Image (cartoon, grey):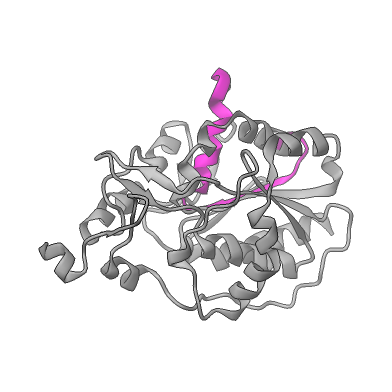
Amino acid sequence: MLRKILGFAPKLESDGSYSPSKMALKMGVSDQTDFENIPYQKYEGKKSKILVICTENKNLKMKNGKYFSTGNHPVEVFLPMLHLKHAGFEFEIATPTGKPVALEMWAFPEKDEHVRAIYNELKANFEKPLNLLDFIDSSFDHPDSYAAIFVPGGHGAMIGIPEDENVGKILRWADQNDLFTISLCHGPGAFLSTTLGNKAFLYTGYNMAVFPDSVDNKTPIFGYLPGKMPYGLSETLKSLGVNLMNTKMDKTVCVDRKLNTGSSPLAANELGKLAAETLLKELN
């Protein structure tokens, strides 16, 4: 009761899940972002498509059995996409089965005109995305049309996607065809899918920026998460041979070979700039 009075208690939603507390939202969510509207020299080649793999799942089960009301974090989705759009790239939105994309709308930057504009522009695509199997069937024979795979974060990226064989197939296809892969925060959980079927982890030895488990472990204190995470993502990746480039929730971004990563929603703008600049440099 005291936690509720002080604003530290997670909010119970109608479906029984919990969204962040008033204090957590005050500390971690802003009406505006740090998006920089950069005038890129647009890409005009044939590799203009970027596949965006989103989550269709909303509720992540914590160790204590409570569910966190999550999805993809809108800042992590839209800021990189804004930079890539302004650099001349276009998007195909997909979820594992073609169900609508789940977004953490409680984290939406309501007063950010740039985010609002791209959200409205692509809303229909997020409501009726491709499914990954259809993408594999229709696009694997046409890698020359694609520049990159983008897996945005938000804790929802850890629901189902790391266990999805089609995600693993697509990441390996991207690697084999010299496409870029872009991800941030909890999005690199998708990389665990490359170990399915007893395959070797695709990214052993890579440098990555990833959301730190140490921060996830602290967030239940002020009601961001309703409990401890089911497993630690950054430590799992480290155990598979990843070199972690950050220890804090900050603006760290990293490029290693064809992989661009960012540490947290605070890095979304920096990752967008890095990805746009890297793709333009390599593809033009």
Q: How many marks?
A: 0
Q: Position of residue 145 (x, y in %)?
A: 85, 48
Looking at the rendering, the stretch of residues picked out in magenta corresponds to 175-201
> Is residue 59 magenta-colored?
no
Observer-nearest of 258 and 50: 50
Above-or-below relation of 30 to 164: below
Image quarter of the N terminus = bottom left
Image quarter of the C terminus = bottom right
Drawn side of residue 72 relative to residue 68, left or right: right
Residue at image point 60% right, 80% down: 113
> Is residue 181 magenta-colored?
yes
**Can residue 118 be seen from the camera position used here?**
yes
Q: Position of residue 103 (x, y in %)?
A: 52, 57
Observer-nearest of 58 and 245: 58
Give the residue at the far front of this rendering: 14
Q: Position of residue 256 (x, y in %)?
A: 61, 47
Drawn side of residue 120 relative to residue 197, left or right: right
Q: Position of residue 215 (x, y in %)?
A: 32, 54
**Can residue 260 be seen from the camera position used here?**
no
Observer-nearest of 125 and 63: 125
Residue at image point 50% right, 37% down: 160
Residue at image point 81% right, 69% down: 42
Drawn side of residue 18 relative to residue 187, left or right: left
Give the residue at the far left of this rendering: 2
